[in-house]
């Protein structure tokens, strides 16, 4: 397969082909994802949870992100590699550019940051340097101590604010949006209005693509799992087959089901 480009993702949105995305933290899983046709692999700061064992993503540093981006990049050929800018790594445009450039040099082809209106200047600055940007909206795990872990955009004012912020971020130069834990109708509205691909997690089926945390979709963490997680390992013989089944389920629209989303 050819490397997945921004142009290719735009074509997938235009043609209604769902974009299959997963998080990745190392070269071995990157090779598996590459082989089974994952379109976009994200070095998520969820590594704070699934790799480092913290309760939140707040302790994750730029050094951690650079290290895991390098590891993942070593195993990837085709999927677009995206890396997260971690907690408080973008206090201003200059630091944002400096840190995004570190992730790009480590092998990322796009950076993702958690956004509200307050990040419009940062997104403008990154776009101005030719750095591809994914704006993460809705539930923002880095804001756990302010926002908690709850569905966002549920009342009318919050829904309007999310729609308008999404529009403003695209105007500022965001190449992609990611919606986390947003009611399915609102997520579908944002996707319809957005000229760029919209990836969802807990955002229903009306978005352009889906993402899950790798360890979650393999059914590894014990205990109660988030509502939007499906364990693809349960019906698969091995890990490559589980990841292939996920890609197939996203492409065919069999994942997510209504019970994975929010009203
Ligand atoms: O860090 C992460 O894994 C993420 C995804 C859940 C979207 O940001
Ligand atoms: Na993240």
Image (tube, grey):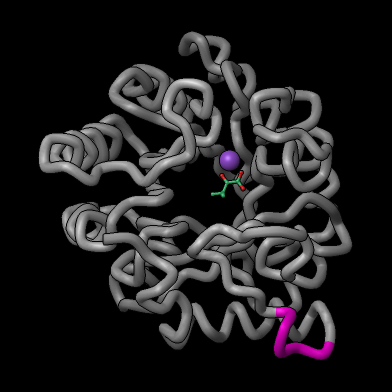
Residue positioned 36% across, 57% down in the render:
197
Taking depth in this image into account, of 4 and 71 the one nearest to the observer is: 71
Q: Does residue 1 show up?
A: no
Is residue 225 found inside the magenta-colored segment of the image?
A: no
Q: Is residue 207 left or right of residue 33?
A: left
Residue 63 versus residue 203 in the image, above or below: above
Is 234 inside the magenta-drawn segment?
A: yes
Where, quadrant-wise, is the N terminus in this rendering? Answer: bottom right
User: Who's the residue at 58% across and 73% down the image?
Assistant: 230
Seen in the picture, residue 129 relative to 165 is either above or below; the reply is: above
Picture coordinates of residue 256 (x, y %)?
44, 75
> Left or right: 250 with respect to 152?
right
Q: Quadrant of residue 192?
A: bottom left
Majority secondary structure in the magenta region: loop
Position of residue 180 measured from the top left corner of the image (x, y, whole percent): 43, 49
- Foreground pick, 17 / 130: 17
Q: Nearer the viewer, residue 77 or 226?
A: 226
Residue 193, percent from left and from top: 17, 54
Q: Residue at x 17, y 42 (%)?
A: 155
Q: Residue furthest right?
A: 28
What's the residue at 68%, 82% (across, down)? 244
Query: Residue 222 location in percent, x, y?
Result: 76, 60
In the rendered view, would you say 131 is above or below 17?
above
Tally the marks: 0
Instruction: Look at the image and tell me whether residue 25 can be seen.
Output: yes
Start-end of magenta stretch: 233-237
- Specify the farthest residue to the front: 223
């Amino acid at each position: 397969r050819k490397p997945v480009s921004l142009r290719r993702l735009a074509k997938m949105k235009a043609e209604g082909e769902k974009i299959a995305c997963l998080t990745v933290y190392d070269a071995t899983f990157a090779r598996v994802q590459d082989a089974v046709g994952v379109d976009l692999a994200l070095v998520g700061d969820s590594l704070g949870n699934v790799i480092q064992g913290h309760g939140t993503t707040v302790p994750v540093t730029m050094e951690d992100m650079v290290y895991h981006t390098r590891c993942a990049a070593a195993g990837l050929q085709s999927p677009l590699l995206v890396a997260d800018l971690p907690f408080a790594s973008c206090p201003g445009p200059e630091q944002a550019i400096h840190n995004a450039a570190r992730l790009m040099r480590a092998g990322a082809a796009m950076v993702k940051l958690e956004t509200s209106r307050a990040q419009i200047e940062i997104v403008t600055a990154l776009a101005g340097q030719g750095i591809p940007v994914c704006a993460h909206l809705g539930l923002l795990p880095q804001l756990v101590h302010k926002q908690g872990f709850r569905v966002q955009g549920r009342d009318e004012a919050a829904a309007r604010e999310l729609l308008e912020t999404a529009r403003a971020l695209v105007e500022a130069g965001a190449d992609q949006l990611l919606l986390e834990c947003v009611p399915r109708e609102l997520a579908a509205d944002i996707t319809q209005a957005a000229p760029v691909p919209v990836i969802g997690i807990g955002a229903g089926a009306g978005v352009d693509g889906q993402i899950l945390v790798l360890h979650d979709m393999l059914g590894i963490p014990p205990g109660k799992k988030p509502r939007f997680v499906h364990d693809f390992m349960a019906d698969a013989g091995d890990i490559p087959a589980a990841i292939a089944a996920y890609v197939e389920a996203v492409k065919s629209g069999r994942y997510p089901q209504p019970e994975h989303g929010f009203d």
